[in-house]
Amino acid sequence: MRITLGVTGGVAAYKSAELVRRLQQGGHSVQVVMTHAAREFITPLTFAALSGQKVISDLFAGSAGGDSNLESAIEHIAVAQRTDLLLVAPATADMLAKFARGIADDFLSTLYLASTAPVIVAPAMNVNMWQHAATQENLARLRTRGVHIVEPGEGYLACGTTGPGRLAGQEEILKTVQEVLQAKQDLAGDTLLVTAGPTCEDIDPVRFLTNRSSGKMGYAIAEAAVRRGAKVVLVSGPTALECPESVERVGVRSTEEMRHAVQEHFSASTVAIFAAAVADYRVADPSPSKIKRGKEALTIRLEPNPDILATMAREKGDRLVIGFAAETENVAENARRKLASKNADVIVVNDVTAEGAGFDVDTNIVTLFSRDGRDLPLPRMSKAEVAQRVLDEALRLRGVLRSKPASHRAGD
């Protein structure tokens, strides 16, 4: 596995050198990212010699003291895309606050926001800083977002005080790394079919009907699933997004094209997640030539498109089917009705009028309504984090359904 080790400015930074060696002994490739403060305690050269890889500590330079260029300016994105785990040890109170509040003013904090990989932080600081309400609030926020916290140990601290705040032992950190990396392969053996983006319905050769979907939610699910070991087929409408690595992308344009692509790949899937914003209507009689501007009102007759989610859910068998619903009113009521009428296992619903939950933004505020009666409201979080929660719910629900007798499952 490719692990990015973040080292922040504290006395415990020297312990991270041994951590690099232990991670490598476990078969992992390690790249170190240091804050400027960390370089006051240990040199980048030490980590470069141990890891055999470039050590990054500047946001706009390829390495310490390097010249800024286009490659280094987007390096945090490249590192974020290729890492399987972000481990920060030691993590100072300052870095925890940056992570919790979304502040990105150096390479490590920017990398955290750009990455969809699991995150582990091992805090180390003065006992009073650790116990301060602000630090505890930041930790609580990070836990809500799925960040794994390796609690500090108790003992004599460098500042001369005694209490919690010492960097956790290496065995404890390594155990957490192993558990997180194993957990993220919990979809190994599964094939996920994911739809994403908008569909377009032609009016004439130059005009079409569509919606504001960017495809970010569906692409986040596809990336999260492949990172967790699944084979993923992504049926995508037109978007400007890059296909996640190792994901099979099937490009479509219209709702009818999406329906055909879904039908082709549905039988091979174990989980189908319909995150695309499919056009509900299409033009009944598209003009073969461009419609000329006139002085009279123009009437375009629309006819309903097939309901892909409902159609496929009728044939789902033992596979899980998850749908997304964008609502503007009566959100919970509409979601529960769709859950039943479409024969879905989970409906993920959001109020697109809420700030931070609409189209073409990087965050979402959703509630998951599951067929076993569980309603799971989530706070505003990144779409990458929502993707992980959706996959978690799919696995939870599958476990619940498998524990039921077949006769009961059939009647659900």
Image (cartoon, helix red, strand yellow):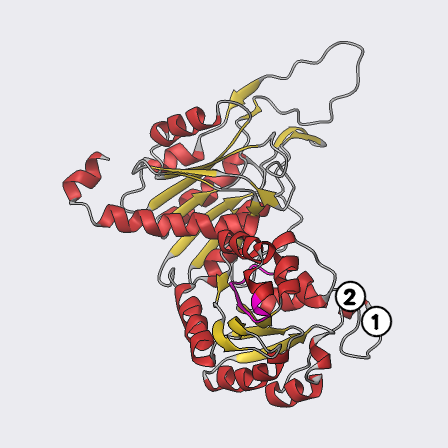
Q: Which residue is mark 1?
A: 68
Is residue 270 something that shows in the picture? no
Residue 358 image offset from top left, x and y in percent? 61, 36
Name which quarter of the figure residue 160 lies in. bottom right
Q: From the viewer's side, name the closer residue of 233 and 380.
A: 380
Q: Earlier in the sequence, mark 1 or mark 2?
A: 1
User: Circle 2: is it few (<14), some (14-19), or many (20+) Cα within 10 Å?
Assistant: some
Quick one: SS at disc 1? loop
Marker disc for residue 73: 2
Residue 344 in the image, given as x and y percentages of width and height: 36, 36
Q: Residue at x 44, y 45 (%)?
A: 273
SS at badge 2 = helix
Q: CA distance from mark 1 to mark 2?
A: 7 Å
- Residue 341 placement (x, y as % from top left): 35, 27
Say what amino acid the circle numbered 1 marks.
Answer: Ser
Position of 303 compared to 298: left or right? left
Verify whether residue 389 appears in magenta: no
Can you see residue 326?
Answer: yes
Q: Are marks 1 and 2 in contact (CB under 8 Å)?
A: yes
Q: Is residue 162 left or right of residue 362?
A: left
Examine the rendered structure and indicate whether residue 75 appears above or below residue 238. below
Q: Which residues are magenta?
A: 114-127
Q: Quadrant of residue 332?
A: top left
Question: Mark number for residue 123?
Answer: none
Where the C terminus falls, by quadrant? top left
Residue 121 highlighted magenta (yes or no) = yes
Of all residues, the one furthest to the front in this rendering is: 161
Q: Residue at x 64, y 51 (%)?
A: 241
Category of crowding for the residue at label 1, using alpha-carbon neighbours closer than 10 angstroms: few (below 14), some (14–19), many (at least 20)? some
